[in-house]
Amino acid sequence: MVHEKALMFIFLIFFVFFTAGCIDTGSLNEDLVSDELYKLMPEDAVQEKDLEIPQVNITESSESDESITFSEIPELPTYSEENSSAVYPKEYRLLSQNFRRAIGKDEKIGEELFNITGKTSGYNMEDVCAVYNHVNRNWQYRYDKNAEFFFGASQTIDSGYLGDCDDYSIVMSALLKNMGFNTRIVTTYNTTSEGTYGHAYPELYIGDDNDTAYRIMDYVAERYPSAENIWYSKRVLDDGQRTEYWLNFDWSGSNGYRHPGGEYFLGKSVIYYPNGLIEYRV
């Protein structure tokens, strides 16, 4: 009976999202928050006709953004859902704990960051992109049959950047976390006529200021000329006055060239925050 009630509860949550007619995300409590996927596109790019995701053009920057330095690294706000009494399903709680444990904080991660950037502090978007390039240049994909077990980030790095999408998300999140940035991990799946496919990827939090977020994405677009578009997601905060911006940090890219802000793997998703919050995107 308890199991049936839990399934019905989860079904109602997904039903609300489906009837809303947009890509929304929310916690298990009754409050829903919007979380939409967008992409920045150059004016001369060919747009995919079959996508129904809003898109905006890349703006031209009048100043040099050789390396956007954060005066203060954006901090995650406190969400009202964190104070709710909602209890997440066991499998989601377990994944959240495993992600946070694997990301952790290790001196070896700091050593790897120094090897990549030559710095121990004062990180900026130039360093963030250098980390992205380093991980993707060295990554070796390995299929992991045990989806519930995650290696620690330093262990994956020591193995020569060998792992699957879960390991990739953990390593990237660990490196960015040790730089002082915030990330979240998204697990997603979709079903086609050929079967069900799952994936995991990290997103980088680039703050709740529109101008800063766009400067960052413009910098990424200029740094990676092969990028046809820069994908990101938005989350409207509880006060309705501010919007969070998250940059896709998956290994995907456009035209086969990997870059931050690559195209999203679309599907039903569960989002894991570093503070334990869990949300859903349908």
Image (spheres, helix red, strand yellow):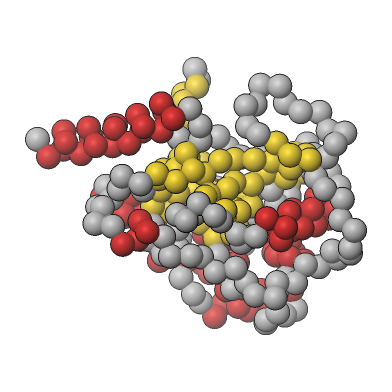
Vertical relation: 220 (above or below) 175: above
Kindly identify the residue that appears in the image at 45 percent across and 54 percent down: 238
- Numbered circles on residues, count: 0
* Position of the C terminus by quadrant: top left
* Position of the N terminus by quadrant: top left
Most distant residue in the top direction: 193
Q: Is residue 150 visible?
A: no
Relative image position of residue 116 (x, y in whole percent): 72, 71
Vertical relation: 43 (above or below) 216: above
Q: Nearer the viewer, residue 226 or 239?
A: 239
Q: Nearer the viewer, residue 111 or 16?
A: 16
The answer to which quarter of the image holds residue 102 is bottom left
The answer to which quarter of the image holds residue 11 is top left
Q: Is residue 238 visible?
A: yes
Relative image position of residue 44 (x, y in whole percent): 87, 33
Q: Is residue 157 left or right of residue 5?
A: right
Kindly identify the residue that appears in the image at 31 percent across and 44 percent down: 30
Kindly identify the residue that appears in the image at 33 percent across and 49 percent down: 92
Most distant residue in the left direction: 1
Kindly identify the residue that appears in the image at 49 percent across and 48 percent down: 186
Relative image position of residue 270 (x, y in whole percent): 42, 45
Relative image position of residue 212 (x, y in whole percent): 71, 61
Q: Nearer the viewer, residue 91 or 241?
A: 241
